[in-house]
Image: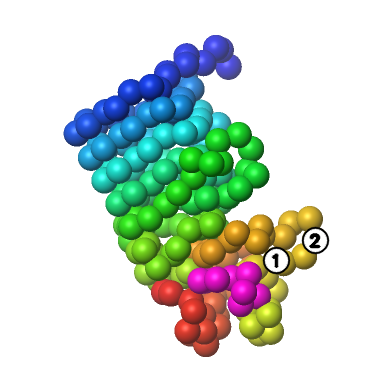
Amino acid sequence: MGWLENVLLENKEIENERLELTNKNSLYFLGPNLSLRNCTVVLKVSARNLIIIGARFIDCTFEVKQELKNHQQWVKASLKRCRFKGRFSGCDFGHWPDYGTGWEYGAIEDCDFTEARLDGCRIMGADPATLRFPKWPCFTILDPIGRARELNSVQWPGGVRPIIVEGQYRDPPCTMAVTLYAPSLAKRRETTEDAFRAVVEQFDFIVY
């Protein structure tokens, strides 16, 4: 693999534009001091090619053309009235104090994930009531830390632990919601989507 070309989007305001972040040989830096308003951002790069720090997105649409995996740097962006489309797994959004440099910019409100597929994605330190989540086969657990005892009091299919509150892999205290994708959970644990649905339907704080 050769050198990657740095594409810097910083210290500017962009409105009503379509941005294509799709070059596999580029490293995209969004921020600091970047403000995007009413833009469409097309993403077709891996998480390691997308660096976000101190960017503000207002009324933007994100179209993800290849699954975006384990991208926690959304917590360094302020997201307001944005729409997300495509597949996200292991991504975190919102306000997560102490998550590396730039966490102070992190915020999310009035955003729409209904056209996205979220798998193991978390909302940190923000009010999930202002957000719209994808429907089944995705399901979203609200206040998972506060509800951990109830969640862990039932037998989940394949021994899944939807929230972990102790040990080194525990979810941070600021986890306000977590969205899971039943088909991939079922595949990993060799069980069925219906088995998950039967458990999900027992809880009024799970949105599906």
Regarding residue 23, the answer to whether it shows in the image is no
Element assignment for label 1: loop
> Which residue is label 1 attached to?
164
Is residue 63 magenta-colored? no
Q: Alpha-carbon neighbours of circle 1 within 10 Å: few (<14), some, or many (≥20)?
A: some
Q: Which residues are magenta?
A: 141-148
Regarding residue 53, the answer to whether it shows in the image is yes
Name the foreground residue: 192 vs 118.
Answer: 118
> Which residue is label 2 attached to?
167
Image coordinates for residue 109, horizontal then vertical, percent: 38, 55
Image coordinates for residue 83, horizontal then vertical, percent: 31, 51
Vertical comparison of 48 with 120: above or below: above
In the shown orientation, is residue 20 left or right of residue 16? Answer: right
Quarter holding residue 62:
top left
What's the amino acid at mark 1?
Ile
Residue sitting at x 38%, y 29%: 34
**Farthest bottom residue?**
202
Residue sitting at x 48%, y 76%: 206
Query: Which quadrant, please, contains the N terminus?
Result: top right
Residue sitting at x 62%, y 74%: 146
In space, the residues marked 2 and 1 are separated at their CA atoms by 8 Å
What's the amino acid at mark 2?
Gly
In the shown orientation, is residue 158 left or right of residue 46? Answer: right
Q: Alpha-carbon neighbours of circle 2 within 10 Å: few (<14), some, or many (≥20)?
A: few
Element assignment for label 2: loop
Vertical comparison of 119 with 72: above or below: below
Quarter holding residue 136:
bottom left
Residues tagged 2 and 1 counted as in contact (Cβ below 8 A): yes
Image coordinates for residue 48, horizontal then vertical, percent: 55, 31
